[in-house]
Structures are given as structure tokens and as C-alpha cells.
Amino acid sequence: MNLEIRDASATDAETIARFNSLLAEETEGRPLAPGVIGPGVTEILTDSAKGRYWVALDGRQIVGQIMVTYEWSDWRNGMLWWIQSVYIHGDYRRRGIFSALYRHVESLASAAAGVRGLRLYVENDNKRAQETYLALGMSDPRYRVMESIFEE
């Protein structure tokens, strides 16, 4: 495998939206509305203030993705990058692609002025993912994520 990681572009939007739909189905058993996820991906790809995607390629085929969004931390007087929408194509899992994507984002974040760290959320029952994150040097701060989602 010849792995390359690059910034996602508008031409990647369809694949990213499809990967996000697969992710939602696999992790939460729920479908994403194409009329919502497609424009949502396009919005980030056209407005970097909202977030940023990177894709991993094997040759010319996208085999994985990672996205970050930003949170201002007054406690740290800096930005935290939230890792989201991580997906690795089923045929490419357990081959170091997520680790490569994570290290790429970690390198960019640590070199960016004012970025204080990385965060992500993970399903409570997803032990394999939790083990991967711990092996990459992340820690469990013992916070719970609470939410109130306004449906369309």
C-alpha cells in the first residue's frame, strides 16, 4: 500500500458524505439524510473556519478520512481541535491508516499557533477504538458528553 494523506477538496465531497453515512450506520445504526450530510460536508470543504477534512489515499482511491472542528478554550487561552467523522474503508482497517491520519493531524495541530490540544468523543462500548486512542497517547479525562440536538 502506498499511503498518501492530503487535504480534502470539493471533488472528495461525495466520497466523504458516503463514508459519513457508513460511519453513522455502523456506529449508531442510523441513516443520515443525503440532503443534509452532502451539503454539510460541502460547507466544511468551502469554509475552513468551520472545520477541515483530510483524506488518506491508496493510489488514487480514498480509503480513510478525518475531520476536525474547533473549540475555543478560555481555560487554556487557545483552541482545541475536535476530531470527528473518522472513517476507514472496511478493506483497509487494522492497517495503520487511522494512526497515520491521527499523527498527521497531531503534527499540524502541535505546530499551529494557539492550538492547545486534540479531543474526540467515542462510544462507551467501542473498546477497540478506545484502546487505539490510548495507544496513540490520548488519555481519558473522564468527562461525559451531553447533548441537546435540534432535529430539522
Image (cartoon, rainbow, N blue to C red):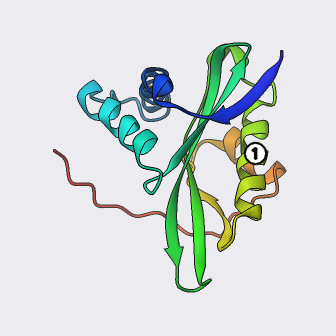
Q: Is residue 81 above or below residue 34?
A: below
Residue at 43% in and 35% down: 28
State the image coordinates of residue 65 (x, y, percent, origin top left). 60, 33
Q: Is residue 101 above or below residue 82?
A: above
Compared across the picture, whether 123 is left or right of 32 comes to right
* Mark count: 1
Is 115 on the left or on the right of 94, as rendered? left
Image quarter in which the N terminus is found: top right
Q: Decide if residue 139 is in sight here.
A: no
Above or below: residue 40 compared with residue 14: below
Q: Is residue 63 visible?
A: yes
Q: Looking at the image, which residue sits at the far left?
A: 152
Where is residue 87, by image quadrant? top right
* Residue 68 point in image, percent of width and height: 55, 51
The residue under the point 33% across, 33% down is 37
- The amino acid marked with disc number 1 is His
Which residue occupies 50% across, 74% down?
72
Residue at (45, 39) in percent of width and height: 45
Q: Quadrant of the C terminus?
A: top left
Q: Which residue is mark 1?
A: 104
Image location (x, y in percent) of residue 148: 28, 60
Q: Secondary structure at mark 1?
A: helix
Give the quadrant of residue 100: top right
On screen, residue 86 versus residue 17, left or right, reads right
Residue 125 rendering spot, x and y as whole percentages = 58, 44
